């Protein structure tokens, strides 16, 4: 999101005054009407990294969306970054299908039912990208996924692009959540509402909130207020905080279930290619010693090709670098769709969970328990009415 022009607050761009004179790239260079893809980011980032390397400097890839970062760090780690992907232009008919979420899902179920099941029906962005890849390559995305997982041909095998050190700035979730809430409060103080209103001036109901700049956390959450349906923005603030906490948890999940597996897989073929270290940022009073100094020490060992003096995980956090025995990103057994007819979406459709884990979480959720209680009460009321009716007759 930070690639889009303006919106420094809602996209949480690093303030210029805090950059210490260090050049920051790929910030604020894309217009709102453009849709920035992982492939574009990969190509632009690689050009900049090559230029930095040519000047004898060290490039640092910071924050952002992990899916985009992995496309830069690793070859063939995403469908979009696979060297087997072509850039064949789309036909007018294909463009028409891709611009209709309903047609995208219908078409993808026909040409690649396996990958259509991988994503939630509401995940229009990923479904659209999968179908777009099929249109431009004549290859089913599921086949490309499979080749990447099994190694396949050399051109589709997962590999490191650079010798890399990845530093995971970790925090206890119970500490991180209120820290994230406070960040949203700071955004409000620093002009969040002005940016949200600025976006709303360009908004229209036909815009897909799963694409482009409109995906940013902090716009859709305020739509009821912007439309005049809510009297105050307070519910939008609460929704933005919840979405931010949820996104942080997804980032942690990606590191544990995707990044660590990829690095382990690559290390079996390229021993010194990629390393992952953990920096404990739970207590900000210890930032200097546990994050700054420790991170610099690890980086110096890495850059000088020396054995790491500091363990890559601090004492007590070694478990964070444990890898699973099996990578799950392409595991059809995990993609079964579960439908809950009790819990309905805002559009009135049944809730859908993808995978047993997601379903188990849903059935234990407060939302589901409340829906069951409500259903039970309605059933009891209906039975009482029927009994009363029979008594009267």
Image (spheres, rainbow, N blue to C red):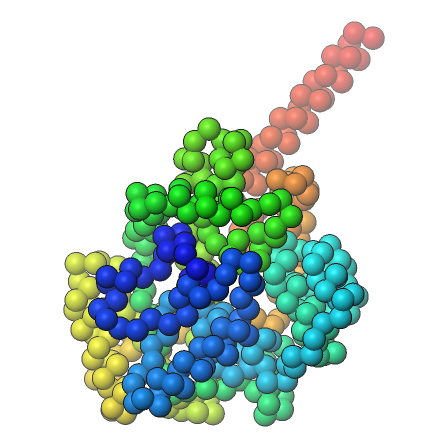
Q: Which residue corresponds to the image point at 64% horizontal and 32% vertical from the top-left?
A: 375
Of residues 171 and 334, which is closer to you in this image? 171
Residue nearest the observer in this picture, 146 or 139: 139
Camera-nearest residue between 228 and 62: 228
Q: Position of residue 235 (x, y in %)?
A: 44, 36
The quarter of the picture where the C terminus appears is: top right
Above/below status of 368 relative to 151:
above
Is residue 147 something that shows in the picture?
no
Numbered-mark total:
0
Q: Is residue 299 left or right of residue 228?
A: left
Q: From the viewer's perspective, is residue 84 above or below residue 361?
A: below
Residue occupying image coordinates x 41% and y 54%: 7
> Where 386 sits versus 283, above or below?
above
Q: Eyeballing the image, is 263 above or below 54?
A: above
Quadrant of residue 212 within the rendered picture: bottom right
Query: Which residue extends farthest right?
Result: 393
Query: In x, y percent, where is residue 118?
Result: 65, 65
Query: Percent from the top left, x then y, of residue 41?
Result: 49, 73
Residue 121 image position (x, y, % from top left) = 66, 55
Residue 62 visible in rendering: yes
* Residue shown at the point (61%, 61%) measured from the top left: 125
Residue drawn at x 41%, y 80% is 48
Query: Could you say which is closer to the camera, residue 296 or residue 135?
Result: 135
Q: Is residue 216 left or right of residue 344?
A: left
236 sits to left or right of 296: right
């Amino acid at each position: 999101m930070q690639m889009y022009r303006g919106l420094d607050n809602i996209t949480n761009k690093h303030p210029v005054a805090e950059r210490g004179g260090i050049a920051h790239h790929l910030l604020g260079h894309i217009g709102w009407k453009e849709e920035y893809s992982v492939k574009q980011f990969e190509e632009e980032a690689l050009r900049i990294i090559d230029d930095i390397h040519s000047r004898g400097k060290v490039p640092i890839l910071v924050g952002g969306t992990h899916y985009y970062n992995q496309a830069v760090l690793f070859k063939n780690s995403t469908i979009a970054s696979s060297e087997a992907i072509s850039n064949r232009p789309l036909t007018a008919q294909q463009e028409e299908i891709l611009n209709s979420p309903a047609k995208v899902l219908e078409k993808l179920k026909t040409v690649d039912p396996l990958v259509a099941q991988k994503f939630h029906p509401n995940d229009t962005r990923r479904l659209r990208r999968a179908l777009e890849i099929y249109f431009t390559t004549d290859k089913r995305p599921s086949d490309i996924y499979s080749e990447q997982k099994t190694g396949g041909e050399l051109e589709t095998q997962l590999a490191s692009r650079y010798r890399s050190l990845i530093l995971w700035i970790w925090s206890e979730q119970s500490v991180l959540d209120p820290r994230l809430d406070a960040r949203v409060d700071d955004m409000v103080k620093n002009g969040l509402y002005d940016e949200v209103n600025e976006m709303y001036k360009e908004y229209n109901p036909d815009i897909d909130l799963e694409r482009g700049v409109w995906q940013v956390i902090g716009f859709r959450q305020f739509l009821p207020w912007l439309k005049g349906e809510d009297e105050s923005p307070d519910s939008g603030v609460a929704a933005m905080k919840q979405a931010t906490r949820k996104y942080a948890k997804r980032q942690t999940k990606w590191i544990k279930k995707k990044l660590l597996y990829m690095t382990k897989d690559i290390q079996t073929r390229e021993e010194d290619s990629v390393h992952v270290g953990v920096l404990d940022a739970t207590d900000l009073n210890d930032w200097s010693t546990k994050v700054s100094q420790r991170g610099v020490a690890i980086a110096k060992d890495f850059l000088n090709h020396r054995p790491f003096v500091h363990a890559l995980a601090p004492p007590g956090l070694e478990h964070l670098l444990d890898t699973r025995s099996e990578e799950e990103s392409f595991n059809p057994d995990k993609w079964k769709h579960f439908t809950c007819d009790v819990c309905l979406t805002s559009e009135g459709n049944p809730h859908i969970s993808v995978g047993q884990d997601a379903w188990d979480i849903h059935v234990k959720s407060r939302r589901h328990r409340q829906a069951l209680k409500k259903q039970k009460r309605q059933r009891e009321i209906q039975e009482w009415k029927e009994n009363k009716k029979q008594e009267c007759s």
